[in-house]
Image: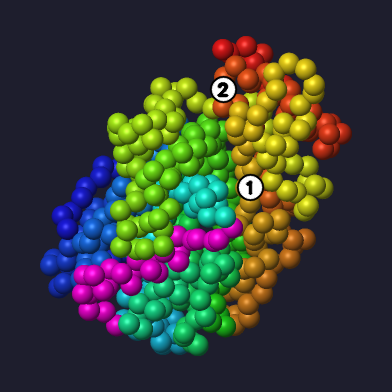
Amino acid sequence: MGACCNDGVTSSPSYNFFPSQDMRFSKHVHDNVHGNIYLDPIVLKFIDTEQFQRLRDLKQLGMAHMVYPGAVHSRFEHSLGVYQLAGEAVHRLQSHQGSELDIDNFDLQTVKLAGLLHDIGHGPFSHLFEREFLPKVLNGSEWSHEQMSGDLIDYIVDAHHIEVDPEKIKRVKEMILASSKFALPKSAKEKQFLYDIVANGRNGIDVDKFDYIVRDSRACGLGCSFLYQRLMETMRVLGDEICYLAKDYLTIHKLFATRADLHRTVYSHAKVKAIELMVVDALLQANNYLNITSHIQDPSEYWKLDDTIIKTIETAPDQELKESRDLIIRIRRRNLYQFCNEYAVPKDKLEHFKDVTALDIICSQKNGGVILREEDIAVSNVRIDLTRGRHNPLESIHFFKDYESEEKFSIADDRISHLLPTSYQDMIVRVYSKKPELVRVVSEAFENFQLNTYGTKAQVHETPEKKKRRI
């Protein structure tokens, strides 16, 4: 694998943990976030496979580059970044608490491999494939990219005859699934804290977030005041769990708040969602002909799926793909589904909220005029939270007073800044008209839906007249 270079300022010092005599002979890449990343020999065996190289053709932020032109970075870059931070985290703990934690080279390699491979099973177009497309075609059966990551790891080991300890691979898969609802029983009874590093199922603080928050912010040209280095420097293991200095609670809150801001301004940007809704419809139209979903259970076929499926649809002459192709052409020509309006679900209605559908909007249409159909409307139900739904994420985190203390504790809501939020989740309902000439009719039906549901219009302002008049 050749070294790659990116211009840019390194945001943090590069921590590499090879003996000095080996570094000259180690392959490395230069990353625009972490600087030089040195690659272990076992890691190169996975990187130099067509299955891992596929990640170069998966944009980290899906279709966000259509709104933020710089957001063209890939899952490949992110995976190398998580690998780097995973190794740094283990070495930090080893240097601070080595004798009591008994961290060995097996642990180090396992955590680093988990960091490298945590997204290898990811689908095209960021989370759109898994959360928006597949639920519409799988009839209730569940599929997750974490599970596919595990399946692909096994496939790569077998197909490329990689000599690696089976116990190491088993734990890598457990670490990747640790924060998902498909988490596996942990085979290790000791050193449970190692499972907190890559995908933290206990409290959501992990190096996956450290990397993508900084990387995504930079790519989109946004500032990022969250400093993960502070948490890496001061973390400590108590009771087999990674804990943090009590005075760092605001840094931790900044982690979750920055993630929520990225969801609001980038990942769930109204125009980004409009484009994503069109891509979902294009995939649905093309699914039967291209047999897209036939790939998702077989890792030997699945790895062939990536973002280039759009180009396949766009350039194929097949008549069966015409409707799908027309949608892609509309995206290229910026003839997008038209955003009509949105509202934030009132706080007292969040607990029992059910996703709003196109049928809900149609049923709120007043008699007379154009009769809307379900295929005229797209609805996006956007959940933005601090990783714990309606709950304060700080409740799941344990802190310590200072390095002389052996006691860990949580911090109650009433003991921290009163400037922090009292609500930890937003639910935003957005409605789009698939045809520009129907914006007025859809907007009026959406307003009626709000009146029928809440007794008032929850949206902030009326849909602009110039948008309603567009033909």
Other-residue count near label 1 (Cα within 10 Å), few / some / many at <14 / 14–19 / ≥20: some
Q: Is residue 303 above or below residue 64?
A: below
Please say if 286 is above or below 257: above
Assign a secondary structure to mark 2.
loop
Residue occupying image coordinates x 64% and y 26%: 340
Q: Is residue 254 visible?
A: no
- Image mark for residue 55: none
- In this rendering, the answer to whether 397 lies above or below 131 is below
Kind of residue at disc 1: Arg
Q: On the rendered structure, is 11 left or right of 183?
A: left
Segment colored magenta: 140-165
User: For the image shown, how many numbered marks are present on the structure?
Assistant: 2
Q: Choose top left, top right, bottom left or bottom right for residue 165.
A: bottom left
Instruction: State the image coordinates of residue 329 (x, y, percent, origin top left).
Output: 39, 26
Is there any visible trace of residue 390 in the rendered image?
Answer: yes
Residue at point 57%, 55% (across, down): 139
Please state if 38 lies on the left or on the right of 308 as rendered.
left
Q: Nearer the viewer, residue 49 or 421?
A: 49
Label 2 neighbour load within 10 Å: few <14, some 14-19, many 20+: some
Does 144 appear in magenta? Answer: yes
From the top left corner, tell me how far across and down residue 42 is, in percent.
23, 72
Picture quarter containing residue 458? top right
Residue that badge 2 annotates: 435
Residue tagged 1:
383
Q: Quadrant of residue 345?
A: top right
Instruction: Say which amino acid is labelled 2.
Output: Lys
> Residue at the location (43% across, 53% down)?
293
**For this rendering, which residue is in front, 22 or 117?**
117
Q: Percent position (x, y) of residue 459?
A: 73, 30
- Point out the residue furthest to the left here: 25
